[in-house]
């Protein structure tokens, strides 16, 4: 209490900013070392070891890298993986940019609904979305059934599924929401006064876009592209489900080296090469995305007023609305088909439906293994959210109020696991937990998932803290409150909505995670891993029912999150 009393003699704002090294920074440093620095150093270190009789021998060597250097198949597969993810991210941006532009600068009403409809698929299980495309593209799938029924094809084609194209199509589907979010945020913030100034100077609509809108939105396009690229470049779930042999990507090879092949040094070397390659690609993308334009003010976009329109103008707007709706159909058609098939009486996933039934839902309640996986997922999700939220709150205050030296560096450093491809992060977490002899199961899963869930919650809380009015804290300190009282009665109520929203998002990320959890679960799978294992041995219609319930649960989480956040914002506005 003595140091608090002395702090009260200085500025209240400085009372939360000590002038010397603070013990509150230690947890941040410890988390960074334990879950970021050491695991990645282990990955690099393991790549310089060798195996003998299936066991790792601690003899430094570059044999794994020499093998990769001489392997034309590896080089081809690496380029194929980077090219496919790059192409999917590019296509995702090309589709998302017109959508974001239309939503941000053309639509006059219901803009938030249109944005939410793009974001919702991100909350739906990745397995569900990928599996839906397998149901559409398969030889007995929806697309082949339609083409044969209409007489376009004489018999079902094998050209739609288990090809490189099917992987590219599914990757593009995954990429669109990530690109949309980043691009929409930038386009919405561009002041309408800049556009009016350009038009008043005699510039055409195209010149205004090229010289004003595009330069100001280009950095966000690069960010959206990078997010989409990261989500797919290390993915081995999608290629396994829709790619087959022709769609093999490097993530599948890395997973096999840590599984069937049991060659960890070679798998680590491949993972390191993938990380370096991804870093180079992202560096080039971010360099291209640099722009000299600076957004100032918060006026934002103002859709053009709807005055009298000619017949041609109305036709053009109608065509624009149709074009704007097509990507939404692309996003939701697979999910709608899966929900419909969950009530299909037939085991064959094809139209026309053979009847409606609840049989597949009833079977779920009789499946003991699945119920165990559901229970395990709930336990893991609760523990991950608890650990991540508590850590994120403490880290956010330590970083924001200067309790951490080089705070900006550690803010980005803690988020490194978010930027690591899923297959590599899973391997990194296996190496770290193996080092300290943590057995496979719930404990490993919680550690692995917390490594990327915590930074997400941290970013949400930090963003809210930076928007707080400093006068609130000053008033609390001036009234005689200490640090703890100010936190409980002033700061935490102000960030409660962000904490709840981040926690719900973290739970959704945990409940849907497959790639990292698959390496850490052992014989104790969570629900997504259990479903993944079932699908590897053949299809059962119950999978549709499982995914439908998971999707409904995700939507309920979104609704609860929005209600709690908006209610918190409304209370602050009233206050």
Image (spheres, grey):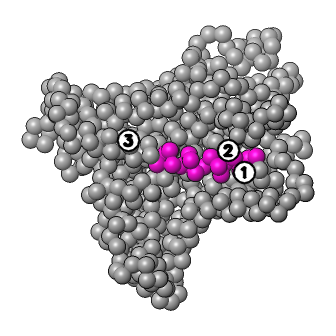
Q: Position of residue 7 (x, y in %)?
A: 75, 13
Residue drawn at x 56%, y 45% as measured from the top left: 93
Tell me which segment is drawn in magenta.
Answer: 88-105
Residue under label 1: 103
Residue at point 61% right, 32% down?
A: 219
**Residue lying at the far bottom of the rendered structure:** 355
Residue 145 lies, with reference to residue 63, above or below; the image says below
Mark 1 closeness class: few <14, some 14–19, many ≥20 residues within 10 Å: many
Nearer the observer, 347 or 455: 347
Q: Is residue 267 above or below residue 523?
A: above
Q: CA distance from mark 2 to mark 3?
A: 26 Å
Dot 2: what SS? helix
Q: Position of residue 451 (x, y in %)?
A: 47, 38
Q: Is residue 371 left or right of residue 521?
A: right
- Alpha carbon distance from label 3 to label 1: 31 Å
- Secondary structure at badge 1 equals helix
Q: Which residue is mark 2?
A: 184
Q: Please rate how many residues cluster around mark 3, counting C-alpha atoms within 10 Å: few if below 14, some from 14 to 19, many from 20.
A: many
């Amino acid at each position: 209490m003595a140091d608090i009393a002395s702090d009260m003699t200085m500025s209240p704002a400085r009372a939360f900013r000590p002038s010397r090294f603070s013990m509150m920074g230690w947890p941040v440093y410890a988390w960074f070392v334990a879950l970021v620095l050491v695991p990645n150093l282990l990955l690099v270190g393991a790549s310089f070891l060798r195996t003998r009789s299936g066991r790792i021998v601690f003899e430094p060597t570059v044999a794994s890298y020499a093998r990769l250097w001489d392997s034309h198949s590896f080089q081809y597969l690496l380029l194929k993986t980077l090219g496919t993810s790059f192409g999917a991210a590019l296509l995702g941006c090309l589709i998302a940019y017109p959508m974001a532009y239309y939503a941000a600068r053309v639509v006059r009403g219901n803009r938030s609904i249109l944005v939410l409809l793009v974001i919702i698929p991100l909350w739906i299980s990745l397995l569900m979305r990928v599996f839906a495309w397998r149901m559409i593209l398969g030889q007995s799938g929806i697309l082949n059934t339609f083409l044969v029924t209409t007489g376009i094809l004489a018999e079902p084609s094998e050209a739609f599924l288990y090809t490189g194209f099917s992987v590219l199509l599914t990757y593009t589907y995954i990429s669109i929401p990530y690109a949309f979010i980043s691009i929409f945020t930038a386009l919405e913030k561009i002041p309408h006064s800049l556009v009016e100034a350009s038009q008043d100077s005699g510039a055409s609509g195209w010149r205004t876009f090229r010289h004003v809108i595009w330069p100001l939105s280009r950095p966000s396009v690069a960010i959206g592209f990078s997010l989409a690229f990261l989500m797919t470049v290390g993915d081995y779930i999608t290629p396994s489900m829709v790619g087959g042999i022709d769609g093999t990507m490097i993530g599948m090879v890395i997973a096999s080296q840590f599984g069937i092949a049991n060659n960890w040094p070679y798998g680590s070397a491949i993972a390191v090469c993938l990380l370096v390659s991804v870093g180079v690609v992202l560096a080039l993308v971010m360099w291209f995305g640099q722009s000299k334009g600076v957004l100032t003010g918060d006026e934002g976009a103002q859709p053009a007023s709807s005055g009298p329109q000619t017949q041609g103008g109305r036709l053009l707007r109608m065509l624009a609305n149709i074009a704007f709706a097509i990507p939404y159909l692309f996003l939701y058609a697979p999910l709608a088909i899966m929900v419909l098939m969950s009530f299909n009486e037939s085991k064959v996933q094809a139209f026309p439906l053979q009847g409606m039934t609840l049989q597949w839902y009833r079977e779920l309640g009789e499946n003991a293994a699945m119920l165990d996986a559901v229970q395990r997922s709930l336990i893991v999700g609760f523990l991950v959210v608890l650990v991540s939220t508590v850590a994120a709150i403490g880290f956010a205050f330590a970083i924001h109020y200067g309790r951490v030296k080089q705070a900006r560096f550690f803010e980005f450093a803690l988020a490194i696991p978010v930027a690591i491809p899923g297959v590599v992060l899973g391997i990194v977490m296996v190496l770290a937990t193996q080092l300290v002899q943590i057995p496979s199961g719930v404990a490993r899963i919680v550690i692995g998932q917390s490594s990327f869930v915590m930074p997400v919650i941290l970013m949400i809380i930090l963003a809210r803290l930076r928007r707080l009015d400093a006068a609130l804290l000053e008033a609390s300190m001036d009234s005689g409150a200490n640090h703890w009282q100010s936190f409980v009665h002033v700061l935490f109520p102000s960030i409660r909505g962000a904490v709840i929203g981040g926690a719900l998002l973290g739970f959704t990320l945990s409940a849907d995670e497959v790639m990292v959890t698959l390496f850490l679960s052992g014989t104790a799978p969570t629900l997504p891993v259990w479903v993944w294992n079932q699908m590897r041995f053949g299809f059962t219609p119950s999978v549709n029912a499982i995914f439908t319930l998971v999707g409904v649960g995700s939507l309920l989480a979104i609704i609860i999150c929005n209600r709690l956040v908006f209610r918190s914002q409304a209370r602050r506005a009233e206050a």
